């Protein structure tokens, strides 16, 4: 059996940063420079008055690496706070994908049927193609995309994960 | 807009003055001409003109490490900035506070591959604590003040300000330092009291305690070294120091075991291996210190005090991490220790010291004395003997065997007295660093203990040393080899000395002369004392070229990939334990 301290697991971290030039480069540079994984990364401004952006990053590593990643992120000067949502309690994760499927006949009908089951919406269609929009957690999107594979899947665009704590909790950060 | 608007260059100079800057190390160029024009017009800040920008950064490091203040560098765009990069990373690795102002092409040309343009913020991002590109004159004063705060607080480090030429000439308002608030950056200095109490419990329950302290004690300021000494004496525990920590506890203190790590003493490494409680104070479990990680101090409970949470549990898992400034945490720890009448059981401590004395008896720093050639260790011993009574002595080193012999054979009684490149191991650091130290301490005896190869890496700075009449001493242990490289080739590569011979060395005596200093050459051990005395008494800069045993290796040594209790003591040891494959890939 692998000892606990060597088991890698996936963690979703929420990083509140000053929305200033170069801040994303600092975060990405930290991951590439220190050899950490990035499974998904999203960033957008979330507070116009205080000029803050939220970066949501899904990463994986042993407990010691995860602790390092959090500490290293907190060390960056424009970072206001980091929360490891995976350990800090229940949270919601959502991702959006746009999935293009090209085909005719039976496959085309089947893709619509599956989209319906997954509550994906067709946001564009031609006689021979659909673009589906699907929202959900990463697992749901993966499942949908893999089902579309044999049905004429030609292109996928995903946003990466956005996440937030459940309930009344607000992320701690210095302002 | 107020009526007393100033240019960017004026604002910069005013901000530097308000930050208490008295010295800037720099080199001019097109992008910084308006700043140099402002420097010309004032006389509060002294500008030291170096001979290459790399020299400016190391000089600022020497200045900073020997004073505790922030070192300031000014370079031009493009090649000026790129020449500064090695020094910036050096300062980053060794936690030295610097502010480096780089010229930049005007904002409208950024990104156009303009003349002498470099993506300075991009290049320096991973080798600075933080960097700023100032695009708006209204940000300037605030950013400069912020830069000093970031550089000097928390875990110190270098900060770059990239300063486009149009902004140096634009007009804006000045803001004094008091008006600057920091939104996101607020390092924690006080340690958690509950954890400090727990640490005291662990230490007082120990039978074989060890204090392992490092550069963080020196970063924290001289008071922290005094507190460390108090804690060592209150607990009665043995204490070892890293290369970066030397001087934090006086070398003559009877609790001091010498340096730990690859070229540390036998007693320090054995104590680290065998202790049952380890208190790490401002050190970072560097690979030079830990040796093979899976065999690192297997029986001990580990406590780590560090201001940087990312240093804790980075390489070695510890039982108790205390985030905070060494000075603050030690003060609380001593209070708690004394108020609870804590004590390490005398009997256990006695037995522990007895064991340690046994290791000390191994006399691991002894070397084969010789009357034919000068042993490099002997040269350092003599230098130490002949300088230790002097009141104000600062030592810098280059990188290599000589650096390790300094750590082993020169006794540092106070913090901030040794300036050396530990983390990056930058050859060419010592000479410009000595120059920076001498500028900060004009009346002190400042000696760069060098190898002949390292000495040449920034030899151009003799020009600076001459220009400002700095009586720096360059004490070259000339073994005609990149000795440290040769030693590893002997140990790991069958003695094939590929490119490690110092071919075509200059005549250092003539070299000193050419720059207007005094050159000396010593070839016999008997002449050494007189030469050192003469060197110390000379009020000009001196290069002392000492012919030392070219074959001498630095022992003891933990070969890479080995554990603390697998030290090599001398040449006779090397055949016994060949370095493992895993060890070979390590540096
Ligand atoms: C050829 C060569 C051989 C070497 N061999 C050895 C050797 O045998 N032994 C050895 O020890 N080193 C050796 N070194 C040096 C080694 O590479 C490291 O630089 C050194 O061990 C690091 O020292 P340190 O742990 O004290 O950390 P530093 O690099 O000084 O880091 C300081 C630590 O303290 C923390 N800190 C900073 N300020 C504060 C504060 N105010 N309060 C609390 N914490 C703070 C920082 O966050 C950091 O974790 C060698 C270097 C070279 C070039
Ligand atoms: C800039 C740089 N290049 C290469 C090295 C690798 N290196 C480490 S020690 C050393 C040899 C140093 O020789 P010298 O200055 O003569 O010192 P000695 O070991 O002989 O005392 C070299 C090349 C380094 N540390 N820094
Ligand atoms: Mg040499």
Image (tube, coloured by chain):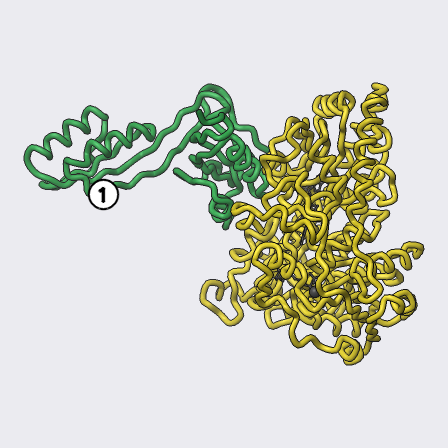
In percent of width and height, residue B267 lies at 77, 39
In percent of width and height, residue B524 lies at 84, 69
Q: Look at the picture and state if A119 lies above or below A79.
A: above
Q: Which class describes the residues within 10 Å of circle 1: few (<14), some (14-19), or many (20+)?
A: few
Query: Residue visible at 84% across and 75% down?
Result: B518
In percent of width and height, residue B280 lies at 71, 35
- Residue B258 visible somewhere in the drawing: yes
Chain letter for the green colouring in the rendering: A
Q: Quadrant of ligand 2?
A: bottom right
Q: Quadrant of residue A43?
A: top left
A6 horizontally vs B358: left or right? left
B530 horizontally vs A71: left or right? right
Q: Nearer the viewer, residue B555 or B331?
A: B555
- Circle 1 sits on which residue? A155
Q: Quadrant of residue B252?
A: top right
Where disc 1 sits, the SS reads strand
| Chain B representation colour | yellow
Q: Nearer the viewer, residue B577 or A101?
A: B577
- Whether the residue carrying mark 1 lies under 8 Å from ligand 1 is answered with no
- Chain ID for label 1? A
In percent of width and height, residue B470 lies at 82, 68
């Amino acid at each position: 059996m692998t000892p606990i301290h060597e088991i890698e697991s996936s963690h979703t971290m929420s990083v509140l940063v000053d929305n200033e030039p170069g801040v994303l480069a600092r975060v990405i540079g930290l991951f590439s420079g220190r050899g950490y994984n990035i499974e998904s990364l999203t960033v957008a401004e979330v507070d116009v008055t205080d000029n803050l952006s939220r970066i949501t990053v899904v990463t994986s590593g042993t407990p010691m690496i995860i602790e390092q990643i959090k500490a290293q992120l907190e060390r960056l000067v424009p970072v206001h706070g980091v929360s490891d949502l995976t350990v800090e309690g229940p949270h919601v994760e959502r991702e959006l994908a746009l999935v293009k499927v090209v085909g005719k006949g039976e496959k085309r009908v089947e893709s619509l049927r599956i989209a319906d089951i997954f509550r994906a919406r067709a946001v564009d269609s031609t006689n021979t193609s659909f673009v589906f929009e699907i929202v959900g957690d990463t697992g749901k999107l993966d499942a949908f995309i893999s089902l579309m594979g044999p049905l004429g899947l030609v292109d996928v665009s995903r946003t990466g994960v956005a996440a937030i704590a459940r309930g009344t909790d607000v992320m701690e950060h210095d302002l | 807009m107020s009526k007393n608007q100033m240019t960017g260059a004026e604002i910069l100079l005013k901000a530097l003055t308000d930050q208490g800057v008295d010295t800037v190390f720099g080199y001019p160029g097109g992008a910084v001409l308006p700043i140099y024009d402002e420097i010309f017009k004032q006389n509060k800040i002294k500008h030291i003109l170096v001979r290459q920008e790399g020299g400016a950064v190391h000089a600022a490091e020497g200045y900073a490490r020997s004073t505790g203040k922030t070192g300031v560098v000014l370079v031009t765009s493009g090649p000026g900035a790129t020449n500064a990069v090695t020094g910036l990373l050096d300062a980053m690795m060794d936690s030295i506070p610097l502010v480096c102002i780089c010229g930049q092409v005007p904002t409208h040309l950024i990104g156009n591959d303009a003349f002498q343009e470099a993506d300075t913020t991009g290049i320096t991002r991973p080798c600075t604590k933080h960097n700023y590109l100032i695009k708006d004159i209204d940000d300037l004063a605030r950013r400069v003040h912020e830069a000093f705060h970031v550089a000097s607080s928390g875990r110190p480090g270098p900060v770059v300000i990239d300063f486009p030429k149009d902004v140096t000439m634009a007009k804006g308002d000045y803001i004094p330092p008091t008006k600057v608030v920091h939104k996101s950056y607020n390092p924690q200095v006080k340690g958690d009291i509950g954890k400090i109490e727990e640490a005291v419990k662990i230490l007082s329950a120990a039978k074989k305690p060890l204090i392992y302290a490092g550069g963080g004690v020196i970063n924290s300021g001289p008071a922290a070294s005094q507190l460390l000494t108090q804690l060592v004496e209150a607990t009665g525990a043995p204490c070892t120091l890293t290369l970066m920590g030397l001087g934090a506890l006086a070398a003559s203190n009877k609790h001091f075991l010498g340096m730990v790590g690859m070229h540390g003493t036998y007693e320090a490494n054995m104590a680290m291996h065998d202790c049952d409680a380890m208190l790490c104070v401002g050190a970072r479990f560097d690979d030079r210190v830990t040796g093979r990680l899976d065999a690192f101090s297997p029986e001990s409970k580990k406590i780590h005090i560090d201001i940087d949470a990312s240093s804790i549990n980075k390489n070695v898992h510890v039982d108790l991490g205390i985030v905070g400034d060494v000075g603050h945490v030690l003060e609380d720890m001593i209070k708690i220790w004394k108020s609870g009448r804590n004590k390490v059981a005398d009997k256990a401590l006695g037995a522990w010291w007895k064991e340690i004395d046994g290791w000390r008896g191994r006399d691991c720093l002894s070397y084969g004395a010789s009357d034919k050639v000068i042993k490099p260790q002997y040269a350092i011993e003599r230098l130490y003997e002949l300088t230790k009574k002097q009141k104000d002595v600062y030592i810098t080193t280059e990188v290599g065997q000589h650096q390790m012999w300094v750590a082993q054979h020169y006794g540092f009684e106070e913090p901030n007295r040794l300036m050396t490149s530990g983390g990056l191991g930058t050859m060419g650091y010592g000479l410009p660093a000595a120059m920076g130290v001498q500028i900060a301490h004009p009346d002190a005896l400042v000696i760069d203990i060098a190898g002949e190869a390292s000495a040449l890496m920034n030899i151009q700075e003799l020009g600076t040393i001459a220009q400002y009449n700095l009586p720096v001493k360059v004490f070259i242990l000339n073994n005609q080899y990149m000795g440290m490289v040769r030693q590893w080739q002997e140990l790991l590569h069958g003695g094939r000395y590929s490119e490690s011979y110092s071919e075509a060395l200059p005549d250092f005596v003539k070299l000193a002369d050419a720059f207007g200093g005094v050159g000396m050459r010593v070839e016999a051990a008997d002449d050494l004392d007189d030469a050192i005395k003469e060197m110390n008494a000379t009020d000009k800069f001196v290069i002392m070229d000492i012919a030392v045993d070219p074959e001498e290796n630095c022992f003891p040594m933990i070969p890479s990939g080995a554990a603390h209790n697998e030290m090599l003591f001398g040449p006779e040891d090397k055949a016994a334990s060949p370095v493992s494959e895993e060890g070979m890939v390590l540096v």
